[in-house]
Amino acid sequence: MNDNIKIWGTAFSLIGDLVMSLPQLTYFKKKYPNSYIYFVIHKKISYCAPLFFNHPLIDRIRISDEWSEFGSNDYEVAKKCEILTTSINKQKKIIENRIPVDPDDWWNKRDCIQQNAYMSKIYDLKEILSEDELYPNLIKWFDDGIEIPQKKGAYTYKKILNTENKRLEKAISIWPFAAYGRSQKRSPSVQWWNKLVDKLIKKKIRVFHCGYITEPSVSDDKNYYFKITDQEFLDQIKLSLATNMSIGTDSGSMWVLGAYSHNSLYLSTNWAKNHISNLDAFIPKNINGKSIFSKDGCDNIDTEHVIDLIDESIYTKKSSNIISIINKFYK
């Protein structure tokens, strides 16, 4: 096949799946160096599109016509592509949804990266890519930290990032609750997070709570605990990247942070049905990531063990008056 072709690339409806699919871009460009890749994002998660700006292997980002389906315009583009990671039905003139491979127990056989590739009809990903190339990689075109609007309707922002070391001082971000595949075991309980955050507050470590706006708070403290789930998703990512460490489960947000090689701690358990082997299947691939696995539920993870790993990552270098500014906007 001529390598000067068009490829209808990833077309997933979850942020984590989009990140997991990034190694597929390397796969296609290695096999077809002159190919043109459409990176397709469902409209319902279009807010995550800026994460993929400036990616050297993406030729065009396309947002689907419909909320979580594909429309007639999508079909017209896809049918002109020589390679599709989803199937099209030319008789009905539609793009069909992906069919999971081994839907009941793939996690006992493959990790998320490989399963994602299987769903894109790529079965030789590990044979074509090196170990390093199997790690998703995002391009950080923005600055880390917090941007606060100064006036309503004005597009002027004041950076309150520590310009000396590009990090918030003694701060971590937590992404407590995974949304997709939610089970009582997949994420620690509110009580578990409350116990951890209380210990961090006693050590005067600032905790930024990221995630969905509807998530419950895990602390009543007003000086060291900041719930910023009302902020835009990209702003939450920017802030997390400025912290010493981010802590969470195998959620899409934690996959994003891993693709930026951010220092991260993953809380993991065998939450999927009959998950008895290959127990790291869901853990995001991150060269700067650590994980703690606990059988039968994240609530069994020892918070003291988590504290020890956080202590290893905390900066002690003095910075500017960023703390007072943070307190002003997040109390």
Image (cartoon, rainbow, N blue to C red):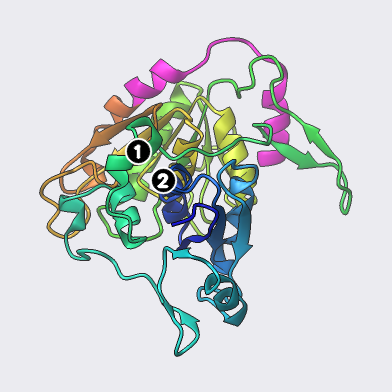
Looking at the picture, does residue 81 appear above or below residue 232?
A: below
Q: Residue 129 carries which label?
A: 1
Q: Where residue 34 sits: x, y (%)?
A: 55, 48
Question: Percent position (x, y) of residue 95?
Answer: 47, 77
In the image, residue 123 lies at what x, y percent? 27, 54
**Where does residue 145 sit, x and y in percent of width and height?**
66, 32
User: Which class describes the residues within 10 Å of circle 2: few (<14), some (14-19), or many (20+)?
Assistant: many
Query: Magenta: predominant secondary structure element?
Result: helix
**On-image quarter of the C terminus:** top right
Identity, as a three-letter code, of the amino acid under mark 2: Tyr
**Which residues lie in the magenta part?**
307-331
The vertical placement of 298 against 153, above or below, is above
Position of 292 with respect to 215 (left or right) is: left
Seen at 43% across and 52% down, the residue is 16
Q: In the image, what residue type sits under mark 1?
A: Leu
Question: Does residue 139 appear in the picture of this structure?
Answer: yes
Tell me, yes or no, whether the two marked residues, 2 and 1, touch with CB atoms within 8 Å. Answer: yes
State the SS at label 2: helix
Question: Which quarter of the figure has residue 39?
Answer: bottom right
Determine the CA span between mark 2 and mark 1.
7 Å
What residue is at 41 percent from the left and 26 percent from the top?
288
Residue 160 lies in quadrant: top right
The residue pinned by badge 2 equals 27
- Closer-to-camera residue (43/240): 43
Q: At 16% from the left edge and 59% from the top edge, which residue is drawn?
A: 105
